[in-house]
Amino acid sequence: MTRSSLPIANSNAVGMRCIRCAESFPLTDYLEGCPACAAASMPSSLQIDYCSFPAALKSHDASEWLVYPQTLLGEGNTPFYALPRLARDVGVAALSVKFEGANPTGSHKDRMSAVLVQRARVAGASTVAIASSGNAGASLAAYAAHVGLECVVVTTPKMSANWRRAIKMCGASIVMVQTPDERWQLVREKSRTGQWYPANNYLLPAVGSNPFGVDGYRAVAIELASQWQEQPATDVLVPTSRGDVLWGVAQGFCDLRSMGALETIPRVHAVEPFPRIEQVQSGADYRTSFGGMSRMTSLGGNTVAYQAIDALRKTDGSAVAVAEGCVLEDQKKLARAGLYLELSSAAGLTGLRNLVRRGVIGLEAHAVVLATSHGYKDP
Ligand SMILES: [Zn+2]
């Protein structure tokens, strides 16, 4: 993409719609979610509203389903393969992995960054910004560099040296603050004055990330439906923080069902480092704060966004918390199967074990674990 030509949006994208109250809005930037739900103190994300979808599934290529269909650095179309020994170990009929570590900066975040920087250029922004503990910042830095945007990553001193180096090499600035809440505060100030174009949430209670970026995650479901061939997935396990990729995968499956490509869709389950969404499913208010600590830094945070609840509701999925010690064991087991993942990313397999043990996922299942990031980034 050259600086002079602006990205062209998908002609099927006709507006924005609230995922909670279903109110429609023009196709433009709503950086703080649905205005109607915000006014009612029920913060919620907007989604891109499509009038129709492509008539057929193309083998592995989902880009034409997205709001900005241009691929920038080769993101997406990630590998999908079976892990039969681990399937026996867990006790399900089939276990497959969708390896998002094969994206250009090594994580699923590239799907969000690719769409986000295209939207930022259309919006006339000069600087994109993100509050990040690692993967998202490294990804946005690379994509901003590619299209000639300035990038600021706001983080805390906990960010590992690997990530800091990658971000700086791409020419982005790192701003250090002391706490995750201070990150959001700074991004909020700069975004509200129009200095930065934000990639993710900066509100408390939280909403999902920028809806243009989240739209990019729908491609995971579209690709899966063309990759699983004669053995459709029954359950998809997604390591989750505020639920951007969880919601994108769930919505992608719903889109496939609405255009007739799938009769039934898999359940999409949220795997978390400590109970947050799980507490909401047991009756807690999603707008409160959920305490907990974890070394699974990519899944951190004390908030739940409404989009996570929506994703589970519309696919009949569950939320499941995993113990760090068990995830460390599964990280080793995955590596012994040839798949070295970031600790946060290995949580998907542990979540599957827990749901099999609870009887939520049956022995006849074809489970797909979304392997969100490779292991080279772990501090
Ligand atoms: Zn709303």
Image (tube, rainbow, N blue to C red):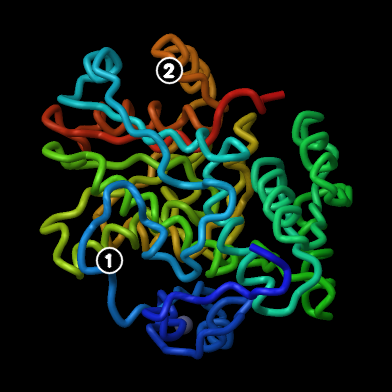
| Circle 1 crowding by C-alpha within 10 Å: few under 14, some 14–19, many from 20 | many
| Circle 2 crowding by C-alpha within 10 Å: few under 14, some 14–19, many from 20 | some
How much space separates mark 2 and mark 1, taking CA atoms?
Answer: 31 Å
Report the residue marked by disc 1.
255
Q: For the point 30% across and 61% down, which residue is it?
A: 313
Pointer 2 or 1: first along the chain = 1
Viewport quadrant of the N terminus = bottom right
How many dots with numbers?
A: 2
> Label 1 sits on what residue type?
Asp
> Label 2 sits on what residue type?
Leu
- Horizontally, residue 373 falls left or right of residue 281, namely right
Please say if 354 is above or below 298. above
Q: For the point 22% across and 48% down, which residue is it?
A: 266
Q: Nearer the viewer, residue 299 or 324?
A: 299
Q: For the point 76% across and 51% down, which residue is it?
A: 180
Outermost residue to the top: 336
Numbered disc 1: secondary structure:
helix
Please say if 116 is above or below 15. above
